[in-house]
Image (cartoon, coloured by chain):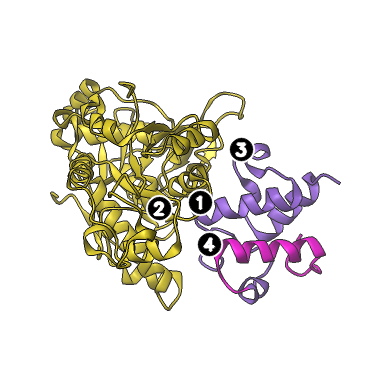
Amino acid sequence: MIPDDAVVKCVVWDLDDTLWDGIALESPDGTLPTPRPEVLELVDRLSARGVLSSVASRSGPSVLAQLRADGELAGRFFAPQVAWHDKSESLRRIAAELGIGLGSLVLVDDNPYERAEVRAALPEVLTLAPEDAAGLLDLPALDPAGLTEESRGRVARYRDEARRKEAEETFAGSREDFLRWCGMRVRLRTARPADVPRIVELAARTHRLNSSGIQLDTAAVRSMVEAPDWFLPVVELTDRFGTYGMVGTAVVAAADPDAWDVRLLTLSCRVAGRGVSAAFLRWLLERAGAAGAPAVRTPVRIGADNMELRLLLRQFGFRAEQDGSAPLVTFARATDGPLPEAPAWIECEYGAAS
Amino acid sequence: MTSAEPRDALEQEIRGLIARAVGVDRAQIDRLPADTPLFGPEVGLTSLAGMTLLALILERYGVDVALEDLNLDALESIAKLSAFVTHHRAD
């Protein structure tokens, strides 16, 4: 029923006769029905394993307003959709709002028609009847033993991000004023053995700001962290809304006296557009220069999905060393010569432990 | 092309697209000479705003800068970008 290799980032719940018994719009006193305790418990257990919950209900706008005003429900459900249109459309909106792929959504709905409609329009979405939803806890990928600290904290970070978005939308002032007000602190330091699982996870999960797209092997990364020929820096971010944990990393072969070879440079798309990538790359170039490397080079996969990374390299004056016919093109620049200014709204700390 | 030459219609349009991508008033971009670097402090293009700009150029002129310009030299300045689009646009 639930494939073992299912990727689940968000469970989308129907409301009437799924989250609660009965139909909200037919409630005699106009209040929302009481949610089923076993469903709320499942939402919380999934949340502790890094799985978000959302809502797709075919009902009236008053139900959405009540849901948002309900202290017990509002914080549990992200990007809730209550509207009369097809549920497949609601799922599309949830995926877009949360910035996750449709294939990582699961619909839980008591109504076989709704499940069939979603399966027909979006075959990549898993659909479950309410009585089968608890089986999600048995997925190997959600086994608590294998979860990183980052995965466990994922739902809390989405909550922080939702507050940040709301603040940005209502902020009176320029975007730069907003970024200053956020109080961003970036910590740049060398990786420790405890960072290895998150480094491997970042390499596997990031696409937009990912240079070469190479996958990392846990054992290999563990030995690189200890080896003097390799330099593995990590980036951590906090702001007034909370901590984002490790949002970026790089794998640098530092033994060649002619150039540092950045085999992988990657940052989480959650921090895109906030100057963190520029602060990271600037620091990396300074470190290379300070270590005596006259140049930095990095292989880049040429594709549409990591275009933003190429723009970052362009901003920093990197040039291609060969033509664009190969799948990986090496870009390079000298470590001397001017670097773009670091974003003025970011406070950088170096080397300190997290 | 230098800043002393008269601005053609295409460059005027591209100044508008740059202002949209960076999220500043059009007048702020109109004041700048054509050889102003896009990634410099006056324009303040970032990697994310650059994505928006390339998408606007593709939509408006059918020119895929990313595909045709490995080093993204077209993003050097307002003038360079205008010249690149002039040269590559489908008529």
- How far is mark 2 from mark 1, CA to CA? 9 Å
Q: Which residue is mark 3?
A: B70
Which one is earlier in the sequence, the residue at label 4 or at label 3?
4
Q: Chain of mark 1?
A: A
Q: Which chain is purple?
A: B
What x and y, as percent, mark residue A322? Answer: 58, 29
Q: Which residue is mark 1?
A: A315
Q: Which residues are magenta?
A: B1-25
What x and y, as percent, mark residue A196? Answer: 20, 32
Query: What label sits on residue B40 in the rendered view?
Result: 4
What x and y, as percent, mark residue A221? Answer: 23, 26
Residue A323 magenta: no
Nearest to the observer: residue A257 or residue A315: A315
Nearest to the observer: residue A163 or residue A209: A163
Query: Would residue B14 appear left or right of A151 to someone viewing this image?
Result: right
Task: Identify the secondary structure beneath mark 2.
Answer: helix
Q: Which residue is mark 2?
A: A278
Are discs 2 and 1 located on one and the same chain? yes
- How far is mark 3 from mark 1, CA to CA? 13 Å
